[in-house]
Image (cartoon, rainbow, N blue to C red):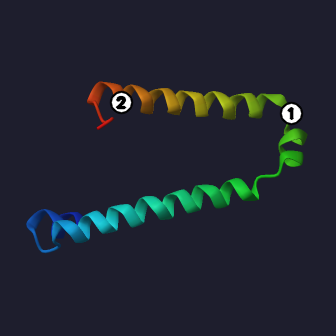
Amino acid sequence: MALVFLATTGVINPSMAALAGDTSRALLVCAIAAAGVKTSFADLAKLGWQPVVMLLGETLFIAAVVLAAVLVLRLDA
């Protein structure tokens, strides 16, 4: 919240705010990739097919919501 306030009031210049945003996105991608690397397909198989189907369904749902937002808000440019 403090950083949002500082960026909004102009204490942090727009180029620094953009750099911080880009860095944040890159680190989030690294964190998601690290979680994927730790995933064991053998452990998933032990759980059975229901959790795998739920995970797949959730992933497809999130992808559909993001795609809809991009199309509605015209974020393609």
Whether residue 3 sits left or right of residue 22 in the image: it is left
Screen quadrant of the N terminus: bottom left
Residue at the farthest bottom position = 11
Q: Amino acid at mark 1?
A: Gly
Task: Using the image, tell me which numbered label, if any, was put on residue 69.
Answer: 2
Residue 10 on image: x %, y %: 10, 69
Residue appearing at x 37%, y 62% in the figure: 22
Asked if residue 10 is positioned above or below residue 62 in the image, the reply reads below
Asked if residue 11 is positioned above or below residue 32 in the image, the reply reads below
Is residue 1 in view?
Answer: no
Q: Secondary structure at mark 2?
A: helix
Residue 52, image quadrant: top right
Q: Secondary structure at mark 1?
A: loop
Residue appearing at x 33%, y 35% in the figure: 76
Q: Nearer the viewer, residue 72 or 53?
A: 72
Whether residue 20 sits left or right of residue 54 in the image: it is left
Screen quadrant of the C terminus: top left
Q: Amino acid at mark 2?
A: Ala
Which residue is labeled 1 in the image?
48
Residue appearing at x 49%, y 64% in the figure: 27
The disc, 1 or 2, on the residue closer to the chain's N-terminal end is 1
Residue 64 on image: x %, y %: 49, 26
Total count of labels: 2
Residue 57 on image: x %, y %: 64, 27
Residue 70 on image: x %, y %: 35, 32
